[in-house]
Amino acid sequence: METEQKRPWYTKKLWWVVGGIFIVIVIGAAIGGSNSSESTQASSAKQTTQFHITEASPATAAPAQPTTQSPAPAPATAQATTAAPAPAMSRARQNAVRAARNYLGYTAFSRSGLIEQLEFEGYSTDDATFAVDEVAPDWNEQAAKSAEQYLDYTSFSRQGLIQQLVFEGYTPEQATYGADQAGL
């Protein structure tokens, strides 16, 4: 009769993620959230500035250009920045991108793992996928960080570590890269 070996609770990534979320919430509460208001105001100011550049005639826009950029590339840049914000990110997508960056700031994730985490936080699959693609971290680097994190608190054989990384959502190539970078 075979018995299934259970991993101790502290080796499961879920507990590390929950602990990390708790720490982020505590730090966010301690800081007070004034930064998000300032970022929103700064974002609004940037959008307003871009809006004014769009509506200004070339004669009116020309005197303002030398203070920020050289005159020659300014019209192309103004057109490029005008075209880029047209499909502006929704608030949900902005928040999903911010959450994805926060998660990657304190632990490593595979692409699918990060999407799942954002979905767990209540973001739609579409917004979570958009955020992960927008942040676009180096997945090999994430696999290497994840491998190091695993080896920091438990022992793995090379094959066991690769299997664990694949289980976490990394591709076999990313998992192998992670094991290589961890010295296994």
Image (spheres, rainbow, N blue to C red):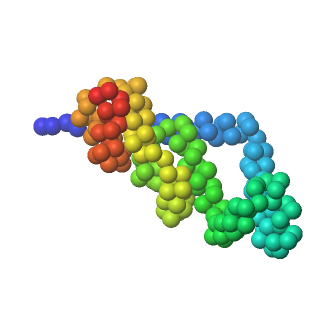
Q: Would residue 43 appear left or right of 166 to someone viewing this image?
A: right
Identified at 73% across, 66% down, the residue is 75
Identify the image quadrant of the C terminus: top left
Quarter of image, res 12: top left
Quarter of image, res 10: top left
Residue 26: give x, y in percent of width and height: 66, 37
For the question of whether residue 164 can be seen, the reply is: no
109 lies above or below 46? above
For the question of whether residue 114 can be seen, the reply is: yes
Identify the image quadrant of the N terminus: top left
Instruction: State the residue lying farthest toward the front.
Output: 72
| Relative depth, front residue between 159 and 54 | 54
Identified at 46% across, 40% down, the residue is 108
| Relative depth, front residue between 178 and 25 | 178
| Relative depth, front residue between 96 and 86 | 86
Residue 34: give x, y in percent of width and height: 78, 45
Instruction: State the residue lying farthest toward the left.
Output: 1
Q: Would residue 95 appear left or right of 103 to someone viewing this image?
A: right
Quarter of image, res 143: top left
Identified at 31% across, 33% down, the residue is 180
Identified at 54% across, 37% down, the residue is 106
Residue 115: give x, y in percent of width and height: 47, 54
